[in-house]
Amino acid sequence: MTYRQASYDEPLLFELESMDAVGKGGSSPAHVPERLRRQSLNLPDLPESTVMRHFVRLSQMNFSVDSGFYPLGSCTMKYNPKVNERLSRDRRATCIHPMQDVSTVQGSLQIMYELEQMLCKIGGVDAVSLQPAAGAQGEFTGLHIVRAYHESIGERRREVIVPDTAHGTNPASAAMVGYDVIEMPSKDGLVDCDALRSIVGKNTAALMLTNPNTLGMFEKDVLCIADIVHKCGALLYYDGANLNAIMGRTNPGRMNFDIVHFNLHKTFSTPHGGGGPGAGPIGVKKELEPFLPVPRIVKDGGGYRFSYDHPKSIGKVRAYYGNFGVLLRAYVYIRMNGGDGLRDISTRAVANSDYLMRRLEKKLDLPFGGRRMHEFVLSGSKLKEKGVRTLDFAKRLLDHGVHAPTIYFPQIVDEAIMIEPTETESLSTLDEFASAVESIMSEPAEVIRTAPHNTAVKRVDEVKAARDLIFSYRALVDHDRLERQRNSTS
Amino acid sequence: MLAPKMLKSLGISSEDELFEDIPENARIGGIDLPPGIGESEMVEEIDAILSKNRTAEDMPAFLGGGSYRHFSPAVVGEILSRSEFYTSYTPYQPEASQGMLQALFEFQSFMSELTGMDAVNSGMYDWSTALGEAGLMCGRMKHGSKFLLARSVSPERKAVLRTYLKGMDAVIQEVAFDQATGRLDIGDLRGKLSDDVFGVYLENPNYFGVLEEEVDDISAAIGETPFVVGADPLSLAVVRPPSDYGADIVIGEGHHLGNSPNFGGPLIGIFGCRREHIRKMPGRIIGATLDAAGRRAFCMTLQTREQHIRRGKATSNICTNEALMAVAACAYLASVGRSGLMTLAGSNMEQARRLSEMIGKAGGYRSPIFNASHFNEFVIGCPLPVDRLAKSLLERNIQGGISLKQDFKELGEAMLLAVSEMNSEDDIRALVEAMGAIR
């Protein structure tokens, strides 16, 4: 075991000493009306060298895909080609104001227009809007489309059905759009058509499904599911988080989904930025196209322009047109791989997952039978025998210089460990990960329970964080003062 | 194609077996897209496509309205290009992700100082969705069916708020602005307030760049009703923080702190609130705590509000956010510092005042249209159709401001112009001369 993450007692920027040379000046303009003028501003004034070192140290205390294996299930943490970064930082891409005259942004619009076309082909849909900022916002947009569609035929349906294996964003998005959420129990990890038949009805607006599901299992009855949903007048929504498993093998349109969102920051390789930005374009079948957000991008007479004249549109879900920087990266990725390349990506993603699963299922339980696709979920229940929980196990993996898998999700698996290796990992990386798991299994419980040992900090007290509620430097100062007072009086 | 060795270790003879669970009548033979291309070819092609754009560097540009162009010191770009930051995921494992967590905590700290809010989350998608979420949050704070919105708010943000509030079937009512000053019409506000109002939204400076001076009177009129204020964080270097005048929630946009306009995305929404409302707040929050050895550490906290725990009962569906933009804002604020930020806010404000005066003297323009203090943008009334003015400016290689004709018909032929340190003296002179010449 050779991994050691950098560990600094790096102060907050606010705690770093200001250098006198930088000065404390700053002219407050006389033109702010007296009654609106700010009296004090407590921000640091630091020399550039201090700032750079601060952030370099922080970066060294941050695990990333470029540092090592990141098998975070459902998040598709594949390696992000560097050409994406180079191209997306071009000033001709970044230094463009969204309200510029349309004649000055023809290049950006071409990229967006062509990306829409390519996503139509990949998703088997007829029209795409690039506006949503992330997958969850794609869901939000899609469900507004569902709502608008039903209202357009004089219906106000109240319920959205999600399987119990669904991503948390699915029910949360449904609730935000004003729907009641019906959670449907799965059977052997899959949607049970009989159970579905018993809960759909005139009040069902949509069923949200990700396929393969969050257990990595393909919903084999998807065509039957689509049939049941459509027969009662509801729509079928595809959560695109797991698209990396099926490109070129099937697509949501072919599976009879009506609406789909794409997570460009997952399948299409744009980096996750520590939590974002992402992009969650939404695709629909022909009859739902009038409801897409405005503006749409249209091409006529050789030029591109925005079109707002869509009276049935749900309106806007965010300012402007989408996360262009992310869209450009996805465009480059799709163009460079081509249709066959994307199919090959899914093949390798599934093969890598299958390979790793075969090694690990000998050590930890794999609930439910059958095949898995791009990811699989193990149960850490066996660990309990030695007095260790999945959480401890995950923390111990960090000591091996890999990121931990997603844990405790999906909730239907006890002590879930959700692993998605992606296609960009070599067999030797997968083997090393499997060896790390094996070696942890044979370690004394105490070592695992107190992990991690080799990261920047030891086990973080999350309970204390939720109790103390310190969200800023100022609150930290106040809290420390109170602690000191308490200690001096006791 | 999988290597034979891989097929063998998976115990399959063909890779198709990996996909055998897909029902036959749902299968496809491939994707109808052209073959992939090499990196050098791609670089050339993108270069050709992007050369069809004209950037704000290629022509003097005076666009604002929520997206602004400011100088970003090189150090910010260097920090952002650390792939330890940009290729990491949401910091679900805090022990391995202290760098991102501390940077986000520092972002929250900067925004807390600027806005005066006790808790600022680590970011929303943009200002407009922060407004949508603020509207929904007001609905959790107070019962009612009506949300009041200043008319002097950006049309982009209004449109997004409408979509967000559809989910709770709320009615949105606009509060007029004073035609002479561009400031909120307090009489109209008082007339529209009632028990049924669950929130009020005002921007300061507003969409017209006008500083709302009567915020104390406005706040008094609003009373206990949840009060949301939108502000450009740059303005808060010199303008009183909204906490000072009773805001419960403060929102804004932060992409111009260290980042670029990006053709409208990615951006980053700022979202903060008072302590008593924290549990009703959307988005990720980073908290300070200790590790097992008693050292300071950071982690995501109050996750029980969030979708991955609370599912259908979460305060929001937001998952992926704009974390890297928050790092950019943090790095920017650290590098320009207190003095740099105050100087910038002051000089941008002064530039706007000067430019509006110069245009006023160019002949025929009412500039500024409102008799008020402005921050970094202002509205002018034009002696010719505003669309013709914009077109003529463009023919002279100048990107003028935003036409208000469609969204604010009552202002007539009006244009919103923004200015910053990125506009040189030459740019400004070119604009004023052109405006004087165009008829």
Image (cartoon, helix red, strand yellow):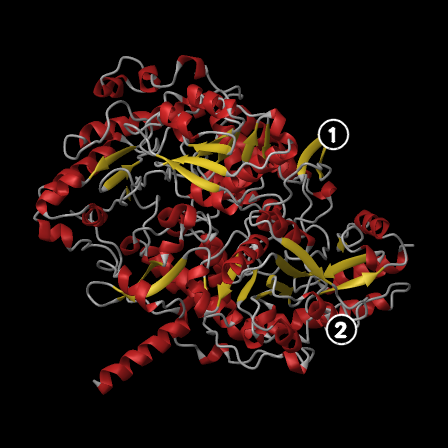
In the foreground, B244 or B257:
B244
Q: Tell me if mark 2 has few (under 14), some (14-19) or many (20+) residues whose alpha carbon lies within 10 angstroms of its own.
A: some
Hey, what amino acid is under mark 2? Answer: Ala
User: CB atoms at circles 2 and 1 under 8 Å apart?
Assistant: no
The single residue placed furthest to the bottom in the displayed view is: A489
Chain designation of label 2: B
Q: Mark 2 falls on what kind of element?
A: loop
Residue B324 is situated, as x and y percent measured from the top left of the image, at: 46, 53
Marked residue chain, label 1: A
Residue A206 appears anywhere in the view: yes
The residue singled out by tag 2 in the image is B372
Rendering coords of residue B419 (x, y %):
70, 63
Q: Residues within 10 Å of mark 1 (few under 14, many from 20)?
A: few
- Residue B395 in percent (x, y) is at 82, 47
Seen at 56% across and 57% down, the residue is: B135
Q: Nearer the viewer, residue A471 or A11?
A: A471
Provide residue A309's location: percent of width, then percent of height. 73, 37
Q: Secondary structure at mark 1?
A: strand
Left/right of residue A210 with respect to residue A384 in the rendered view: right
Write down the residue under mark 1.
A300
Is A237 placed above or below B22 here? below
